[in-house]
Image (cartoon, helix red, strand yellow):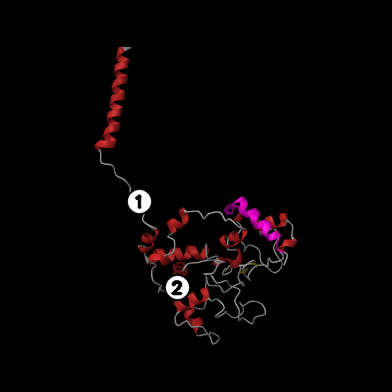
């Protein structure tokens, strides 16, 4: 019994000794804090910036909802673009201010009605008004550096050269790591949810004038079951004249229950 106690006491003393040595005797290596967001962006290479542009094009920018080579017909196919931005400048109908391909791409995003590719204007406008929302506006809300990242992606996806500057300082877009780490806060109002999920990029509703998807200003005539299904399973009931598979089908995973119900109540109140 005494031998057992001696062994146990020795084991405890040895364990405490190793623990103390590990925490005091060995210099502790403390990981450096993550770089500030602006520092991360400032260190971004052009290749990383182009990758960011592709992510924005396919994600936050909601560009592929309309510029989609599979669906086609809704907007010019810039994924497999047959005419370069420089060639667009030579179109006799072009009356904008752009002098280069980079300027044309930026103008087409922030002032989309400056030049509308033939056949892709709002119905009844003779291609003088674009259905595309201003992507720096509330419907999409891209920052200047995010717009530049998309331009860099579009310039290089077919083997061209990016001419945009890398972002610095306050104009910097969120770094990919930072953007993925921080989930967006839940919307507090239905209007805020419309902006958060870019509903106004396609639909006319509230303060938004989207013209790509169905007009929702009179959607309140539908019952709440229909409205809820239209958000969670958009292909269940597709409006006449609009193709299936365009509206995002993952809102059920992205929205909180409160956001969903706020939107349903808001839509129900839209009686035109």
User: Which range of residues does the magenta coloring cover?
Assistant: 252-270
Q: Is residue 271 above or below residue 16?
A: below
Q: Determine the residue positioned at 52% across, 64% down.
A: 58
**Residue in view at x 29 percent, y 36 percent:** 23
**Residue 262 belongs to the span the image colors magenta:** yes
Query: Outermost residue toward the front?
Result: 188
Q: Can you give x and y, in whole percent of width and height, for residue 87 in the image?
A: 49, 82
- Would residue 206 appear left or right of 173 to someone viewing this image? right
Dividing the image into 4 quarters, which one contains the N terminus? top left
Q: Is residue 240 visible?
A: yes
**x and y percent of residue 226 in the render?**
72, 57
Report helix, strand or loop for mark 1.
loop
Q: Residue at x 65, y 53 (%)?
A: 261
Residue located beneath label 1 in the image: 33
Gap in Å between the C-alphas at discs 1 and 2? Answer: 35 Å
Counting other residues with Cα less than 10 Å from the Cα at mark 1, is it few (<14), some (14-19), or many (20 or more)? few
- As drawn, 6 above or below 58: above
User: Considering only order in the chain, which callout, 2 or 1, is on the residue closer to the N terminus?
Assistant: 1
Q: Disc 2 marks which residue?
A: 155
Q: From this viewpoint, which residue is outermost toward the top? A: 1
Answer with the quarter of the image where residue 165 lies: bottom left
Which residue is at 38% across, 65% downward? 169
State which quarter of the image contains the C terminus.
bottom right
Nearer the observer, 27 or 248: 27
For the question of whether residue 81 can be seen, the reply is: no
Instruction: Give the main secondary structure of the magenta stretch.
Output: helix
Tell me, yes or no, whether the two marked residues, 1 and 2, touch with CB atoms within 8 Å. no
Sort mark 2 into few (<14), some (14-19) or many (20+) by Cα contacts within 10 Å: many
């Amino acid at each position: 019994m005494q031998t057992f106690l001696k062994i146990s006491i020795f084991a405890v003393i040895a364990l405490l000794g190793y623990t103390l040595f590990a925490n005091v005797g060995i210099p502790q290596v403390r990981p450096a804090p993550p770089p500030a967001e602006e520092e991360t962006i400032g260190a971004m290479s052009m290749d990383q910036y182009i990758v960011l542009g592709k992510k924005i094009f396919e994600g936050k920018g909601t560009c592929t909802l309309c510029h989609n080579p599979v669906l086609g017909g809704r907007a010019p196919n810039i994924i497999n673009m047959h005419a370069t931005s420089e060639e667009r400048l030579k179109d006799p109908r072009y009356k904008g201010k752009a002098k280069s391909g980079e300027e044309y791409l930026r103008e087409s995003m922030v002032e989309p009605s400056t030049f509308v590719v033939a056949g892709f204007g709002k119905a009844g406008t003779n291609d003088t008004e674009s259905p595309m929302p201003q992507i720096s506006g509330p419907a999409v809300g891209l920052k200047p550096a995010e717009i530049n990242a998309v331009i860099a992606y579009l310039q290089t996806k077919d083997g061209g050269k990016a001419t945009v500057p890398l972002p610095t300082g306050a104009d910097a877009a969120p770094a990919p790591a930072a953007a993925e780490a921080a989930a967006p806060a839940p919307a507090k109002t239905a209007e805020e949810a419309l902006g958060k999920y870019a509903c106004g990029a396609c639909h006319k509703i509230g303060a938004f004038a989207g013209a790509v998807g169905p007009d929702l200003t009179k959607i309140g005539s539908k019952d709440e079951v229909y409205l809820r299904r239209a958000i969670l399973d958009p292909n269940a009931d597709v409006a006449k004249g609009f193709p299936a598979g365009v509206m995002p089908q993952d809102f059920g995973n992205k929205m909180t229950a409160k956001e969903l119900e706020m939107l349903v109540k808001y839509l129900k109140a839209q009686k035109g």
